[in-house]
Amino acid sequence: MTAATMQQQALTEATDTVSSVPTGLFIDGAWRSAADGQQFSVHDPATGDVVARLANATPSDAMDALDAADRAFPSWSRTPPRERAELLRRTFDLVMRDRERIARIITLEMGKPLRESHAEVSYGAEFLRWFGEEAVRISGRFGSLPEGTGDMIVSRHALGPALLITPWNFPLAMATRKIAPALAAGCTVVIKPAALTPLTTLYLVKLLEEAGLPAGVVNVIPTTNSGGATGPIIADSRLRKISFTGSTQVGRVLLEKASANILRSSMELGGNAPFLVFDDADLSRAVEGALVAKFRNIGQACTAANRFIVHASVAQEFSRRVAEKVAQFKLGSGFDPDVAIGPLIDEAAVAGVDELVQDALSRGATLVTGGKRRGGAGTFFEPTVLTDVARDSRILREEIFGPVLPIVTFDTDDEAIAIANDTEYGLVGYAFTASIERGQRLINELQTGMMGWNVGVLSNAAAPFGGVKMSGLGREGGAEGIDEYLTTKYTLLPSVSRP
Ligand SMILES: O=CCCC(=O)O
């Protein structure tokens, strides 16, 4: 079969799959249309075509969702952890059963190449399995006061109803990374998926329903009126937790709103990841790492390497090898099996990336490959490599969120670390060096929540994902992920004399 035939067949299958995605809101265990009957459209970014029309949740729907989550909380938080775990495990099995369908939905609504959508399904499903396993390991402790006058019990409890706001770039994984720990902890949720990519979440909720989800435990409110729908929920004192993944700008607004009721808040915000290549690095491994750290998800990941900081003695060779590979990347529909770079999510994304490239060029950067948007239908930007990027270029300060790889050089370790830390963000850093001492120094001195040492991708359900500085608050995944949905209670009782 030719690539074109395979692409057409995959697109047809995806369109068929979308017809099995519910188009309503899911509130209190039932699918329904929006209170005012309004709908909105979801588009395929590769063609601009409308792929679905969905109910557009109103503020009144949103409050119904919170009511349902609040009503369900007492019973769900007392449901035995093993039962909560088994619901998550059954959902994991159903996601794996339907992985082909889910991958197609992701590519159709978000644009990434189908093989990357498959990788997202595996990655996203793991949060269901991992937190199912964590649900039965929520523990406290017992101790005595140092004075011997009392005994203390430290217990942990589900926080209450949680609002989860997810982004468009990993429509499955960002939903499971929040829903799974919340449910494992005993919290109930209202989830608002990104209006650009709500189909994957709706399909996931259909699977949760099939797995036996009790009414009200998960409620979904796709909407184009994000602030209008979530504002009243955040202002309601029954809500006890907010978890958001998205831009620092929006995170700051949500934190301000959340401060009114002193809400427990998890914020997974922007990044500006440095990618350091030292003179002792294995260059083949560094090039391989650079390609995945930059071009995974078409560069649209908060973890995407944003600034390539390369030792002057290897910069020319590194740039040559990277550019040679990038120039071969095929740009096109994610359903084409040969495509490495799909469309950006929308017009605004293309315009934003273009502006950053133009700014860098105007300050003297050299364009090695790519550099412009592709004409015709869809929102495509060529995979691009820039060298000699001036330090004051916007592209080194702002999150690119697109397939552009800018390279700067350094001479000393001190200089490399200073450049890497010269940002308000601190999500992840990548470092390629064979030196253990240098790696250890970087662990201590890179101002980030995560570090990839000789690897270009590090996301995993078992790992605590999160940042420092303006990259956010809290951790998702790992043993730490469930803590975000639990509160700690200390109880003191008089000590009794023990033998
Ligand atoms: O874009 C944010 C999430 C990226 C990831 O989980 O690897």
Image: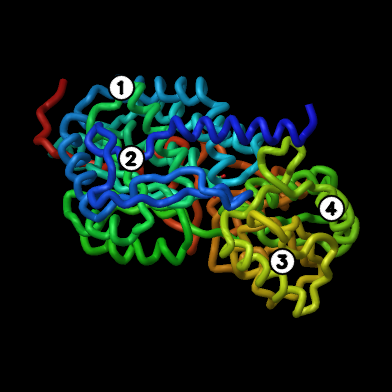
Measure how far apart labels 1 and 3 are at the Cα level: 55 Å
Mark nearer the viewer, 2 or 4: 2
Which circle's residue, 3 or 4, is located before the other in the chain? 4
**Circles 1 and 3 in contact, beta carbons < 8 Å:** no
Q: Residues within 10 Å of mark 3 (few under 14, many from 20)?
A: few
* Disc 4 residue: CB within 8 Å of ligand 1: no
Measure how far apart labels 3 and 4 are at the Cα level: 33 Å
- Residue kind at label 2, given as amino acid type: Gly
Measure how far apart labels 1 and 2 are at the Cα level: 19 Å
In the rendered image, which residue does mark 2 sit on? Answer: 24
Measure how far apart labels 2 and 4 are at the Cα level: 43 Å
Dot label at residue 414:
3
Dot label at residue 212:
1
In the rendered image, which residue does mark 4 sit on? Answer: 327
Q: Secondary structure at mark 3?
A: helix
- Residue kind at label 1, given as amino acid type: Gly
Q: Secondary structure at mark 1?
A: loop
**Circles 3 and 4 in contact, beta carbons < 8 Å:** no
- Vertical placement of 406 versus 91: above or below? below
Mark nearer the viewer, 3 or 4: 4
